[in-house]
Amino acid sequence: MSALLFSGCALWPHHDKKPPGILRVHVESETSSAGSTKTISILRSKPVLVNISLEPILTEADVTGAKIIGPDGAFDVQITFKDTAGWQLEQYSATNPGKHLVIFGQWGDKPADGRWLAAPLIHRRMAGGVLTFTPDATHEEMETWVKGLDAHARANAPAKEKD
């Protein structure tokens, strides 16, 4: 009888499904023969190939908030990171000037609902734990993504921050 109760949980659909907000921030890297890098294509209208480290430096687990800045036609996305992730962003940007941060986002369940969004050039050390970029995406796609990132951040915030 107890086995039936435990396995029965999967029979009911979950109606509170939130949009996924997946984020991967990689750093441009030199080609490696050790298999620790890969080449990706960024920008749909005029594709550019960029070689990146396989391991992301930041993910959605590091996010405390995200928002869209600007009107529908010309907008940016601003992501705010936890303190430790902000320091990590600062460290990587300070040691990699002239390289790109390469940003991947996933905002739905289908493969078409995710892609490489941007590759901003690192000009200087990025202090403050905030990353702002212009995505290769529609305003609607980014609204869904930002909601997913915020939902993930709220769900994983310490109890005192959830209020």
Image (cartoon, rainbow, N blue to C red):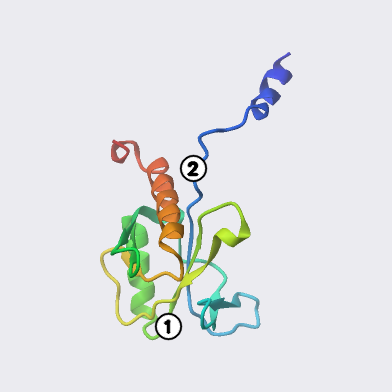
Residue name at image x 44 percent, y 53 percent = 144
Taking depth in this image into account, of 119 and 162 the one nearest to the observer is: 119
Q: Which quadrant would the N terminus be assigned to in this image?
A: top right
Q: Position of residue 136 (x, y in %)?
A: 45, 71
Task: Say which label, 1 or 2, has the lower sequence index.
Answer: 2
- Dot 2 corresponds to which residue? 18
Question: Is label 1 in contact with label 2 (beta carbons under 8 Å)?
Answer: no
Mark 2 packing: few (<14 Cα in 10 Å), some, or many (20+)? some
Q: Nearer the viewer, residue 107 or 151?
A: 107
Q: Residue at x 57, y 33 (%)?
A: 14
Say above or below: 86 vs 148: below
* 147 sits left or right of 19 in the view: left
Q: Which mark is residue 99?
A: 1
As drawn, the residue found furthest toward the left would be 128
- Can you name the residue that lies furthest to the front here? 73
Q: Position of residue 160 (x, y in %)?
A: 29, 37
Q: Quadrant of residue 139?
A: bottom left
Residue 155 position (above or below residue 42): above
Q: Is the residue marked by circle 1 packed among few (<14), some (14-19), or many (20+) residues within 10 Å?
A: some
The amino acid marked with disc number 1 is Lys
Residue at point 68%, 27% (across, down): 11
Label 1 to label 2, Cα distance in Å?
34 Å
Going by the numbered disc 2, the residue's amino acid type is Lys
What is the secondary structure assignment of the residue under circle 2? loop
Viewer-side label of 1, 2:
2
In x, y percent, where is residue 108? 55, 53
Name the foreground residue: 75 vs 32: 75
Determine the secondary structure under disc 1.
Answer: loop
Horizontally, residue 147 falls left or right of residue 12, namely left
